[in-house]
Image (tube, grey):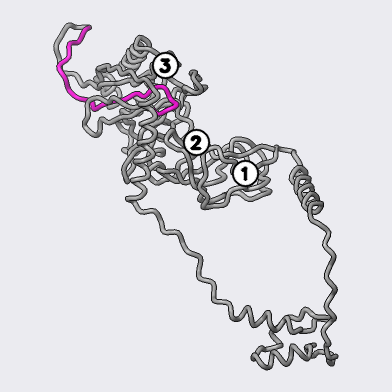
């Protein structure tokens, strides 16, 4: 048997609220299957299971707010019988029974005098009939609890008491959170994560001006004749170049936990995406270094759409090993980003701008489209020398877009 716990769905998440279970006890689940929907401070996230098994018990009710790491359910391993639960239940019941003192049963009340009735007629005790007539109770509507199903005085009194109960008010429907409240909650979560980052992580910053003429020319040729919906964006080339550069400098791809660096097994790039209600979120594109540009473009477009629609998966929220932010569309030329803990690096891109440039191969002055690439890195894990080599590698990769 194993436990299913609420995962951390981002560096700025300490708790979440269970919105819905998508499984029931007895259901078989497979690794990667969405089993619950959890509301974070930024979005409702589909939470996946990470091991095959059978749902044993659901321990958290929908609507419950819980801390990260809370056990939400227990599951049986493949082939495991649910005997453990039955044994525990029997043991608990047996222990409870042993703890209950033996109390002498009170003397039984004498059975009410019930007049015999012809077949097909309702059996009613005299006292019950008299009381029912006085209170206007319809005896035929009652279910008797006396001998042979006879209606007793207690049955009449119980029916009167139930009839006098006030009608139960309809269950209160929780008011939906307003856009202003959601935005305020998001800002608080971002503030907590970024404050932690600047408090705990000794950042260092490096910047590199990258010529983009070759990348732009190649992108224009690659998009020629493509439908608009299938065209590549420069952001995809930048993401792929970052991922390939990280292969050579793996100390920038991983996490700082418990006082030491833990290298990531894959390169899962968190893409900073602005939300319509304010704030941003950085879900992951997985294994970016292994995917063709066409695949990355489709996955990026889908990720942006689902992020803004609030339909992300927990693996996309908890898996980023490095983050890339691109503020070129907002017009800025350079980004000095803040690292998302426990990650150890963040890469930024500004807008592509025309600048005077000396072509070193020709010694000529020209006008060149350039972008400023930046690196924010954790000085506990890497130093400026390695960070500079990473940016130089990123620059060279963007000069060979056909190899991305």
Report crowding for label 2: few under 14, some 14 to 19, many 20 or more residues within 10 A (C-alpha).
many
* Residue 219 in the image, given as x and y percentages of width and height: 30, 26
- Tell me the mark number nearer the camera, choosing from 3 and 1: 3
Is 257 drawn above or below residue 138 in the view shown?
above
Secondary structure of residue under mark 3: loop
> Which numbered disc covers residue 8?
2
- Identify the residue shown where x is 63% and y is 38%: 3
Q: Is 138 placed left or right of 241 in the picture?
A: right
Which of the two discs, 3 and 2, labels the residue nearer the N terminus? Answer: 2
Which of the two discs, 1 and 2, labels the residue nearer the N terminus? Answer: 2
Split into 4 quadrants, where in the image is the N terminus?
top right
- Identify the residue shown where x is 44% and y is 20%: 253
Which of the two discs, 3 and 1, labels the residue nearer the N terminus? Answer: 1
Question: Circle 3 sits on which residue?
Answer: 380
Is 368 drawn above or below residue 313 in the view shown?
above
Gap between marks 3 and 1 measured at Cα? 37 Å
- Identify the residue shown where x is 35% and y is 9%: 385
Q: Is 91 placed left or right of 49 in the picture?
A: right
* Residue 50 in the image, given as x and y percentages of width and height: 59, 35
The one nearer the camera, 91 or 341, is: 91
Report crowding for label 1: few under 14, some 14 to 19, many 20 or more residues within 10 A (C-alpha).
some
Secondary structure of residue under mark 1: strand
Residue 122 picture quarter: bottom right
In magenta stretch: residue 329: no
Kindly tell me whether residue 239 is visible in this rendering.
Answer: yes
> Which numbered disc covers residue 73?
1
State which region is magenta.
Answer: 340-360
* Residue 2 in the image, given as x and y percentages of width and height: 66, 37
Q: How many marks?
A: 3
Secondary structure of residue under mark 2: loop
């Amino acid at each position: 048997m194993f436990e299913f716990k609420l995962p951390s769905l981002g560096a700025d998440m300490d708790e979440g609220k269970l919105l819905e279970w998508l499984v029931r006890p007895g259901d078989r689940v497979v690794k990667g299957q969405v089993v619950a929907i959890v509301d974070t401070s930024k979005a409702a996230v589909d939470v996946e299971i990470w091991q095959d098994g059978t749902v044993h018990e659901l321990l958290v009710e929908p609507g419950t707010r819980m801390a990260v790491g809370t056990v939400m359910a227990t599951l049986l391993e493949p082939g495991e019988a649910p005997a453990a639960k039955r044994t525990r239940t029997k043991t608990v019941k047996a222990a409870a029974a042993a703890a209950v003192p033996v109390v002498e049963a009170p003397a039984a009340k004498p059975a009410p005098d019930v007049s015999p009735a012809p077949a097909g007629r309702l059996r009613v005790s005299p006292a019950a009939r008299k009381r029912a007539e006085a209170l206007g109770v319809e005896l035929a509507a009652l279910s008797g609890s006396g001998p042979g199903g006879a209606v007793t005085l207690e049955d009449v009194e119980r029916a009167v008491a139930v009839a006098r109960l006030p009608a139960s008010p309809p269950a209160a429907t929780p008011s939906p959170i307003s856009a202003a409240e959601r935005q305020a909650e998001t800002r608080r979560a971002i503030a907590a994560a970024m404050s932690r980052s600047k408090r705990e992580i000794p950042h260092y910053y490096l910047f590199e001006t990258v010529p983009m003429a070759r990348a732009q020319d190649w992108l224009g040729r690659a998009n020629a004749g493509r439908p608009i919906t299938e065209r590549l964006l420069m952001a995809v080339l930048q993401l792929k170049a970052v991922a390939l550069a990280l292969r050579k400098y793996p100390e920038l791809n991983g996490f700082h936990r418990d006082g030491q660096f833990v290298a990531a097994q894959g390169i899962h790039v968190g893409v900073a995406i602005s939300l319509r209600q304010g704030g941003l979120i950085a879900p992951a594109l997985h294994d970016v270094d292994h995917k063709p540009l066409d695949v990355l473009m489709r996955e990026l477009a889908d990720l942006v759409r689902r992020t803004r629609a609030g339909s992300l998966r927990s693996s996309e929220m908890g898996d980023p090993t490095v983050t890339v932010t691109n503020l070129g569309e907002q017009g800025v030329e350079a980004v000095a980003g803040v690292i998302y803990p426990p990650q150890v690096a963040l890469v930024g891109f500004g807008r592509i701008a025309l600048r005077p440039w000396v072509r070193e191969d020709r010694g000529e002055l020209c006008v060149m489209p350039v972008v400023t690439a930046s690196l924010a890195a954790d000085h506990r894990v890497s130093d400026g020398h390695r960070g500079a080599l990473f940016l130089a590698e990123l620059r060279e990769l963007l000069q060979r877009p056909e190899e991305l």
